[in-house]
Amino acid sequence: MKEETLKRIFEFLEEKGEHIIPLPVKINLAMPIAKEDLNVKGDLNLRRTNITSLPEGLKVGGDFYLTNSNITSLPEGLKVDGDLMLTFSKIASLPDDLQVGGSLNLSYAKITSLPKKLKVGGSLHIEDTKITSLPEGLKVNGNLGLSNSKITSLPEGLKVGGYLTLSHTNVTSLPKGLEVGKNLYLRHTNITSLPKGLKVYGKLHIENALLRKYTDDQLRDMVKPGFIDGEIFR
């Protein structure tokens, strides 16, 4: 059935009060969107859709899925209480005021930079992206996944509540004040030393990294008055 025919059927049913049109259907069929439609109480699934834009003022109470979509940008004022999944999307930029209560996953997306005021309540994943830097003052309560990205440096004072993975990146040094709540993965990196004051509450992974030339004791002494709580895997 053609989209135009479907659109007319849905519009007729809505006019008769016999059917409430879901927001994804309205977006896909380019139907008029009412103000009350913009407040989605649960999850919003727009995976593998051909949409290229979203209405301003959109708020999603659950998770928002845009995986494998053709969308290139998100609207100003977007707020997602759950996770925002943008993996394998064509997203090229994020709004400056984006708020994500859960995790933000941008792995394999087309994006090249992050907004300065980005707020993420959970984990942040930018694996296999062309992003080269993180915003100053960024705090990640969950995990921070940077493997195989184009990241070259980390901001000073970075705090990560979960694990931090920098495997297969071009980062050559770690910043002052770095704290990692769980494991720190530095596999296949050219980092040659660890900063004083580094705090790792989990394990340190340095498999196939230049840091393997140091003994465990040397690495632990290197970060004092910081610490590496767990084992060191080499």
Image: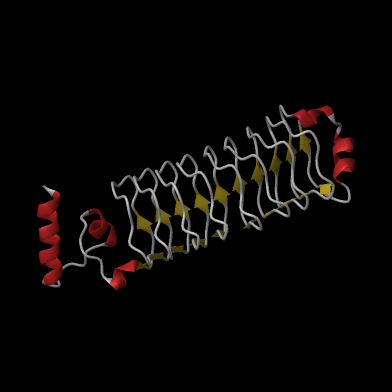
Task: Give the image quarter of residue 74.
Answer: bottom left
Colour treatment of the image: secondary structure
Q: Position of residue 79 (x, y in %)?
A: 45, 64
* 99 over 109 or under it: above or below: below
Q: Quadrant of the C terminus?
A: top right
Task: Give the image quarter of residue 115.
Answer: bottom right
Q: Position of residue 118 (x, y in %)?
A: 55, 58
Residue at 33 percent of width and 58 percent of height: 54
Q: Is 11 on the left or on the right of 149, as rendered?
A: left
Residue at 54 percent of width and 44 percent of height: 126
Q: Position of residue 26 (x, y in %)?
A: 23, 60
Q: Position of residue 90 (x, y in %)?
A: 39, 43
Q: Is 114 on the left or on the right of 182, as rendered?
A: left
The image shows a total of numbered marks equal to 0
Work out whether residue 76 or residue 78 is closer to the camera in this orientation and state it: 76
Q: Is 1 on the left or on the right of 114, as rendered?
A: left
* 65 over 36 or under it: above or below: above
Residue at 55 percent of width and 43 percent of height: 131
* 87 over 76 or under it: above or below: above
